[in-house]
Image (tube, grey):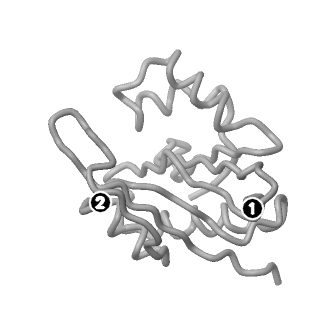
Amino acid sequence: MRIRRAAETDLGELQRAIFTDMSLAELRAADERFNRPPDSLHIVAENDDGEIVASCNLIRETHRMRRHRAELGGFVIVPAERGSGLARRMIDYLARYARREWDVSILDVACRGGTAAERAYRGLGFTEWARLPGGYLDYDAIYDEVRLYRPVPPLD
C-alpha cells in the first residue's frame, strides 16, 4: 500500500472508485480547493495493483489563533480495505505532514453522529469536543454534527 499526494491525473480513478456520485467537474473543483499548497493537502492510497483505494484531505486553519489546527475532510476508504489498518496509516501520515510542514498540534474533524464514521474516528484516537443536534440534513435523514479532535505528537 502506498500513500501519496493526489495528482490531477488521479481524478478519473477517484471518480470511478470512490466518488461515484460526483461529476468530474465537481471532483476537479474539490481537488483545487483541497490540494492547494501551502495550506491544504489531498492524499490517496494505492493498493499493490496501483488502484486508488482511499482519499483524504487536510486543510490548515489560517486564522492566527487557530494556526495550530488542521481539519480533515473527505476521508473515504473503499469497503474492501476497511479494517486493514489503512485509515490509521493515512491519519498518521497526515499528522506527521501537518506537524512537519505547518507545526500543527491538533487534528480536527466533523462527521455525522451515530455512524460508522464516528466510530472509526474514535477508534483512531479522536475525542469528541462538540455535538450539534440535527447539524446535518442528508436527504431524508437528520444527524448530529459531531466534532472530534486528536492531538498531534511532536516529531521524533
Give the numbered dot on residue 78: none
Name the one closer to the observer, 40 or 49.
40
- Left or right, 126 with respect to 97, comes to left
Give x and y (percent) for residue 9.
Answer: 64, 26
Task: Look at the image and tell me in which quarter the N terminus lies.
Answer: bottom right
Query: Of callouts 2 and 1, which one flags the residue occurring earlier in the amino acid sequence?
Result: 1
Nearest the viewer among 115 and 48 is 115
* Vertical order, 59 against 119 (above or below): above
Residue 6 against residue 145 in the figure, above or below = above
* 80, above or below 150, in the image: above
Q: Position of residue 14 (x, y in %)?
A: 49, 33
Judged from the image, the secondary structure of the residue bearing numbered disc 1 is helix
Residue situated in front as seen by the camera: 144 or 114: 144
Image position, residue 94 (x, y; %): 66, 61
What residue does disc 2 label? 113
Residue that lies at the very extreme toward the left in this rendered image: 140
Quadrant the C terminus occupies: bottom right
Q: Residue at x 64, y 43 (%)?
A: 42
Compared with 63, 66 (above or below) is below
Circles 2 and 1, Cβ within 8 Å, touching? The answer is no
Given the image, on which type of amino acid does mark 1 rest? Ala
For the point 77% across and 58% down, the residue is: 67
Residue hosting label 1 = 98
Q: How many marks?
A: 2
Q: Give the residue type that dot 2 points to.
A: Gly
Cα–Cα gap, marks 2 and 1: 26 Å
Q: Position of residue 30 (x, y in %)?
A: 57, 29
Residue at the (68%, 67%) spot, across then down: 95
Bin the neighbour count of mark 1 within 10 Å (Cα to Cα): few under 14, some 14-19, many 20 and up: many
User: Disc 2 vs disc 1: which is toward the camera?
Assistant: 2
